[in-house]
Image (spheres, rainbow, N blue to C red):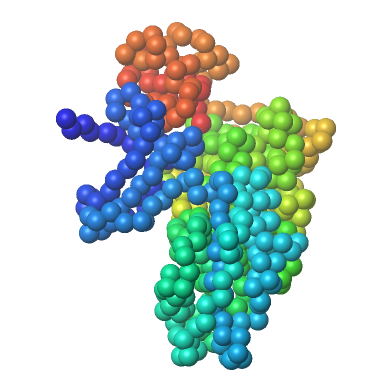
Amino acid sequence: SEKTYRLAGDYEPFFEDVDISHGGVRIRVPLWAVERGNIIIFDQESFNQITVTYDLDRKLNTGVINYSNVVGTKKILIIRLSNDSVDAHKISQTEDKLMNDFFWDSNNLKKVYWRCSRQKLEFIPATPNAVITIVPPSDVCGMKWREAGDYAIDELQNQFEYIDRSHTLIVMPNCVDFEGAAAWAESPGSKSWYRSLYASLPLVQVHEIGHNLGAKHSGKNGVRYADDTGYMGNQGMWTDEGNKMCFNAAKIWVFGWYSEFHKTSNPEKTAFIGNLVGISDAKNSPNAVTNNGFHVIVRLKSDSSRLFMVYNRKAGLNAEVADGNKLVIIDQDGRYTESTWKAALDVGESYIHKNWNGGSRNLIIVNCGLQNEGVLESMFAIAYLEGLTSAQCNNGQTFNTAPLPDLNPGCDLTEVWWHDVDGEEYNCEWYSQSNRCAAYGDQFENDGYTANEACCACED
């Protein structure tokens, strides 16, 4: 029999690229992600298990957005489109050099993702051949990059047995028409295309595979690629050595590599007051971060506004990042949309986001200063909605706050004075699990309260 299901949680990104009203969308979910009332929960735990497939002609295709793509071991095949006997059709990298530039030298595609993901995502050479040379057609010069790439794929299939891989990278002669770009990539997808002149640059390699993983560009001050705090801009070092950095706060949040250190705060309910650590410290000292209650990424989120904050510490895997040792603020509306750099705050500086969530109040974010807790250096920050919630730095040591009233003082999850209309089982402790506050928190009112009003666990 037919059943109707409702979606709850952060599900919008699964459908950003398609109009779901046409009926050609299919969702595959594990049974444990379907909760009470036939509600499908989209949260950090279920992202890796939920897939959405779609086709505008209602014919299922390979346009799959699968969040397990950002973890695990992925095989890389590089097609070297080159005629080494014709200078104009020859690329500068030999097969051995491409292996070195993508996998083995000091800074490359493999090493950046391995470092930045905390060893959660590894790119390895495909076997038995990771680099294969295909001779281009005689009229390759001036050919569009897509056409030349299709030729390379066709010839690969004609000349070789199937090679198991997750991603296919095609490096082409400089005379191919790249329409002004250094490279191109599917987003999301598995293919990317590189002009030989730029193929050995970590900035280009990591950027394009970032597109394959679903990440979009990051801009700054109205310029689409100008964010210099991560690889989805284009402001890093355009050299074979590249520079040590990772991704901006929004992209790191989406990839989920530091998800146990994420914090979501709704400024319309309470001020954010807390400490952030750099991603390198979270990678090296995760237990210390957890024990101190610190965060790596803080997401400030209301209905129509979303900001991400990070202490952009200039150390370790992020040692050469721009805006180092500042509180960096990034705006990104959806899970897989373009992001925008908004501010980089030195100690004592503040950022004002006007008309938060389309209302009349301004959001205030302040970098209160640095603190040291044993092996960790952290940045103390506050964020509050002017005229509704408040917080003070007081030299980064103390603060006061005026959140909305807490109907469950102390956040004692075993306090069962309130439960929803369906019975004592559905108390504040039940709502504190998984994504239940977001899924059910505004429903099942009892004694004049819903869970979002009665339970401190539902404040964020």
Q: Which residue is found at the position 46% from the left and 62% from the top?
A: 162
Identify the image quadrant of the N terminus.
Answer: top left
Q: Which residue is found at the position 45% from the left and 58% from the top?
A: 188
Q: In the image, residue 379 lies at what x, y percent? A: 73, 41
Please say whether residue 299 is visible from this viewpoint: yes
Q: Which residue is found at the position 50% from the left and 57% from the top?
A: 164
**Left or right of 374: which side holds 34?**
left
Which residue extends farthest left? 1
Please say whether residue 174 is visible from this viewpoint: no
Q: In the image, residue 408 lies at what x, y percent? A: 51, 15
Q: In the image, residue 284 lies at what x, y percent? A: 75, 40
- Examine the image and state in which quarter residue 357 appears: top left
Q: Is residue 184 above or below residue 148?
A: above
Q: In the image, residue 133 lies at what x, y percent? A: 56, 76
Of residues 199 and 306, the one nearer the viewer is 199
Of residues 77 and 372, the one nearer the viewer is 77
Of residues 28 and 271, the one nearer the viewer is 28
Which residue extends farthest right? 374
Q: Is residue 2 above or below residue 158?
A: above
Count of marks, rendered view: 0
